[in-house]
Every structure is written in structure tokens, then in C-alpha cells.
Image (cartoon, grey):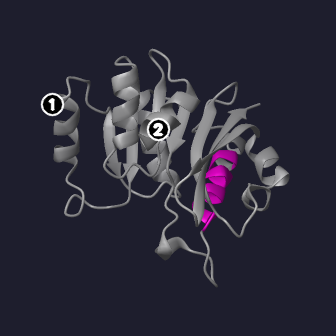
Amino acid sequence: ISAYLLCNIARIQKHQTILDPFAGSAATLLAASLISPTVRVVGIEIATDEFLPRDDVRMDFTARGVTEPVSLLEGNVMDRKTRDNAREVIGEDASFDVIITDPPYGRREAMSGGGVSVAALNDLIDVIGYDRKRGMPILRPDGGQLVAFLPCPKECEIQDLLPSEERLAAAGLQLQKKREQRLNNAISRWVLSFSSI
């Protein structure tokens, strides 16, 4: 259900190119492909095939009658070469129409002293800005869209966790909408939608 929520907020359209930089088992990419079978999806996942067999992920797409991902890259989205490889598989000098993801924010990524981490989303926004500045944007600079989840414990305000205006400006992004999804009494997950400007 979460994957479909992200895709619906992104308003997935025919023939779009979609990247999930924290793909995991590619559930979000699968949802996008089920919504619009003509999309071309690419996933980046740091886990090796030993922990996340990519052939099994591809079989999941095939079993549901949708086109397999263009690529399921093993790597870290923070690595420039990995991002360049992702762009290359959709076409030379190409940028993605949509980046859609549920970044890691578990215990391992938590801020010191507890809570949740916003580091993965902030790091992703930083590399979007870096790639744009170097003239090789990973996200289409004229109307591309970033849609991501951001957790918010009940003791926090979402405004305090959002990426800073300076960070967004450096990436050429603008927050378009935010919507709360309550998970339980202790935490909400917000879906954030940013547009390239």
C-alpha cells in the first residue's frame, strides 16, 4: 500500500523514467509498473545479491505480467559512478522524470540520542544538487519530481525535519506538498513531493 501511495502522489504517467535510489525489493518500482506498464524503472540498492537476489525481484515483475526493471544496480546512490550508471541505462545524457523512494530511516540510521534520521533524504537531495551543478542531472531539471517518505515521531514537528530551504535551493527543488500517514501512536510517516524548478 505504501508503494502505491508514493506512486499516486507522484502521478505516474506513461513512458516516464523512474528511479528508486533505495530500491530494496523494488516494491515501489513494481507498483509504478503496475500503475503504468510503459514506465521504465531503475533501482539502486546497496545490498548484494546474497542478501537481495535481483533475479527473484525480476521474477516478481514477470509473474505479475509487467516489464522487468531496466536495471537493478548494486551500489550506493551517494556514489557518483553508481548514479552515472543509472542514467546511462536509460540513455546517454538522460535524466529521470521521477525519483520515488522510501529512504532508510531505521535504528541503524537514527540520529544520536534516538529519534529518526533524515540523513538519507538530505543526502539524496544533496546529490541531486551536485549532479545538477556538474551538468549531469540525475533528476530532470525542468519539472522532474522527487517523492519520498519522511518519518516524524510524535515528539517532533514535521517542519523541524523538512530539508532546509537552502538545501532545496541548491538542488533546484521546491516542496510541492506534504501529507501525513499515521503509522501508530508514536510515529507518522509523511509523504513529501518536490518539483525541479
Q: CA distance from mark 2 to mark 1?
A: 21 Å
Q: Is residue 62 left or right of residue 120?
A: left
Q: Is residue 97 visible?
A: no
- Number of marks present in the image shown: 2
Decide: few, some or many residues near mark 1? Use Cα within 10 Å; few <14, some 14-19, many ≥20.
few
Does dot 1 land on a helix, a strand or a loop?
helix
Q: Is residue 124 left or right of residue 32?
A: right
For the point 44% across and 34% down, the residue is 4
- Residue 54 is situated, as x and y percent measured from the top left of the image, at 22, 48
Q: Does 122 sit above or below residue 113?
A: above
Magenta segment includes 14: no
Q: Amino acid at mark 1?
A: Ala
> For the stretch drawn in magenta, what is the main secondary structure?
helix
The mark that comes first in sequence, 2 or 1, is 2
For the point 35% across and 52% down, the residue is 24
Query: Quarter holding the N terminus?
Result: top left
Location of mark 2 (residue): 19
Q: Is residue 193 left or right of residue 86?
A: right
- Residue 94 is situated, as x and y percent measured from the top left of the image, at 52, 28
Q: Is residue 19 visible?
A: yes
For the point 19% across and 63% down, the residue is 50
Q: Amino acid at mark 2?
A: Leu
Identify the magenta region: 117-129
Q: Which disc number belongs to residue 138?
A: none
Decide: few, some or many residues near mark 2? Use Cα within 10 Å; few <14, some 14-19, many ≥20.
many
- Residue 98 is situated, as x and y percent measured from the top left of the image, at 55, 32
Does dot 2 land on a helix, a strand or a loop?
strand
Query: Quarter holding the C terminus?
Result: top right
Nearest the eye: 19 or 88: 19
Location of mark 1 (residue): 63
